[in-house]
């Protein structure tokens, strides 16, 4: 029996995810938490992915200015009941999903790929005719080789 590929999220899932993201961002912006792991921590909610049945939602966060991410995630688990109550007041849906907090690593992955692309040996392969690759892997100011 062949495995089925997961379906893309539906329009309703995307809409609910965006509503939850905006509401959580507003809560994190305006509220001060008593949890020691969340005191003076600024968080950005990059994405909220609800499950197809809308009972669970994975919330991807990035702490602004860094921070101890495992402690922040533990603190968010502890304040989850408060967050769900606040969401119930702000978002008009039948059930407030259970929140699962995760670190958003897409920025780290993008930085890693950018560093790889700017290595001299990789830049040489991307722009083979460009001999002006500096020690940082960048070119002489252009992003593409000069036309001949």
Image (tube, rainbow, N blue to C red):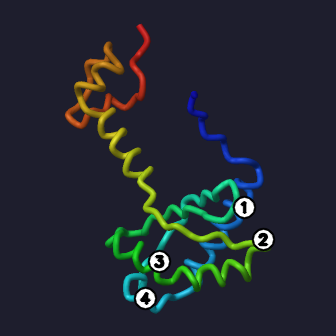
Label 1 sits on residue: 16
Q: Secondary structure at mark 3?
A: helix
- State the quadrant of the C terminus: top left
Q: Disc 2 vs disc 3: Cβ atoms closer than 8 Å?
A: no
Label 2 sits on residue: 93
Label 4 sits on residue: 35
Which of pointers 2 and 4 indicates the residue nearer the eye? 2
Mark 4, Cα crowd under 10 Å, few <14 / some 14-19 / many 20+, is few
Q: Which residue is located at x 42 percent, y 69 percent? A: 63
Whole-angstrom CA distance, mark 3 to mark 4, is 9 Å
From the top left corner, tell me how far across and down residue 53 is, in percent: 70, 58
First in sequence: mark 2 or mark 4? Answer: 4
Label 3 sits on residue: 76
Which residue sits furthest bottom? Answer: 34
From the top left corner, tell me how far across and down residue 78 is, in percent: 46, 83
Q: Secondary structure at mark 4?
A: loop
- State the quadrant of the N terminus: top right
Q: Secondary structure at mark 2?
A: loop
Whole-angstrom CA distance, mark 1 to mark 4, is 27 Å
Q: Disc 2 vs disc 4: Cβ atoms closer than 8 Å?
A: no
First in sequence: mark 2 or mark 1? Answer: 1
- Above or below — where is 22 with respect to 82? above
Mark 2, Cα crowd under 10 Å, few <14 / some 14-19 / many 20+, is few
Q: Secondary structure at mark 1?
A: helix
Residue 81 sits in which quadrant? bottom right
Whole-angstrom CA distance, mark 2 to mark 4, is 28 Å
Q: Which residue is located at x 73 percent, y 72 percent? A: 95
From the top left corner, tell me how far across and down residue 17 is, in percent: 67, 60
């Amino acid at each position: 029996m062949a495995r089925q590929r997961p379906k893309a999220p539906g329009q309703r899932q995307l809409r609910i995810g965006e509503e939850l993201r905006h509401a959580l961002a507003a809560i994190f912006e305006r509220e001060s938490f008593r949890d020691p792991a969340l005191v003076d921590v600024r968080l950005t909610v990059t994405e909220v992915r609800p499950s197809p049945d809308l009972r669970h939602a994975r919330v991807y966060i990035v702490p602004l200015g860094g921070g101890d991410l495992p402690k922040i995630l533990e603190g968010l688990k502890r304040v989850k009941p408060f967050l769900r109550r606040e969401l119930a007041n702000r978002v008009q849906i039948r059930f407030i999903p259970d929140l699962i907090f995760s670190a958003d690593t897409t920025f780290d992955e993008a930085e890693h790929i950018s560093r790889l692309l700017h290595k001299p040996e990789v830049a040489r392969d991307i722009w083979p005719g460009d001999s002006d690759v500096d020690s940082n892997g960048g070119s002489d100011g252009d992003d593409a080789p000069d036309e001949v």
